[in-house]
Image (spheres, helix red, strand yellow):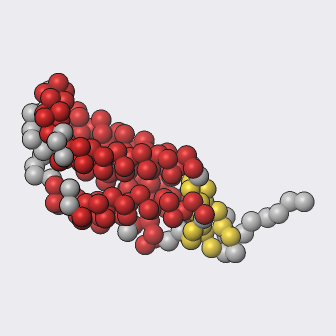
Amino acid sequence: MGITEWIISIALIAVVIRQLRGRKLTLVGLLWPVPLVAWGAVEYLGGVPADLTDWAFVAALVGIGLTLGAGCAVLTRVYREDGVVKARAGWLAAALWIAGMSARLAFGLFATNGGGGAVATWSADLGLHAAGTWASALIAMALVEVLVRSGVLFVRARRVPAVTTVVE
């Protein structure tokens, strides 16, 4: 793993860390992680898995990404303050996001620093055929996690009432 992968991983982890205190929710703020993951897709995806087992593995990791992204978004408070829509990630939202992002980082470190043999064994045990199945699955997982989180927060932000009434 090179410095670029480290920077992207840390930037993706920072997405939710920055929201722990509550931040203005903007379209740019929701979408800036997408190019980071898209770069990873261009950089690491060598082809489409050819075997059904490989597709099932990719689908399983996409399901995990969907769950983590949706969970993070649902556990993020979206509210209006002083006329501005804001988002504040809860600790559980941050934990889900960091779990997904850091797990991919940890796997990359493991695979490129002596864990290649173990990854090959796991691949054989899982019945994976294509050399790029792990990369395809992990990139697809990240892309879905980012897109689902951004999409759910976007929809939730659009539904925040313009005026909040205070009942005393």
40 is higher (above) or lower (below) than 131: below
29 is higher (above) or lower (below) than 54: below
User: Horizontal placement of 17 versus 64: left or right?
Assistant: right
Is there any visible trace of residue 123 in the rendered image? no
Which residue is depicted at the point 47% across and 46% down? 96
Which residue is depicted at the point 60% across and 65% down? 22
User: Horizontal placement of 106 versus 162: left or right?
Assistant: left
Q: Name the residue at the top extreme.
A: 125
Which residue is depicted at the point 24% across and 48% down? 108
Is there any visible trace of residue 145 in the rendered image? yes
Q: Nearer the viewer, residue 89 or 98?
A: 98
Which residue is depicted at the point 37% across and 61% down? 10
The x, y position of residue 32, in whole percent, is 37, 68
The x, y position of residue 121, in whole percent, is 15, 29
The x, y position of residue 109, in whole percent, is 24, 48
- The image quadrant that residue 50 belongs to is top left
Quadrant housing the C terminus: bottom right
Q: Name the residue at the right extreme.
A: 168
- The image quadrant that residue 149 belongs to is bottom left
Q: How many marks?
A: 0
The x, y position of residue 48, in whole percent, is 12, 46
71 is higher (above) or lower (below) than 89: above
Quadrant housing the N terminus: bottom left
Q: Nearer the viewer, residue 117 or 24?
A: 117
User: Horizontal placement of 79 versus 156: left or right?
Assistant: right
- The image quadrant that residue 31 belongs to is bottom left
User: Horizontal placement of 60 versus 2: left or right?
Assistant: right
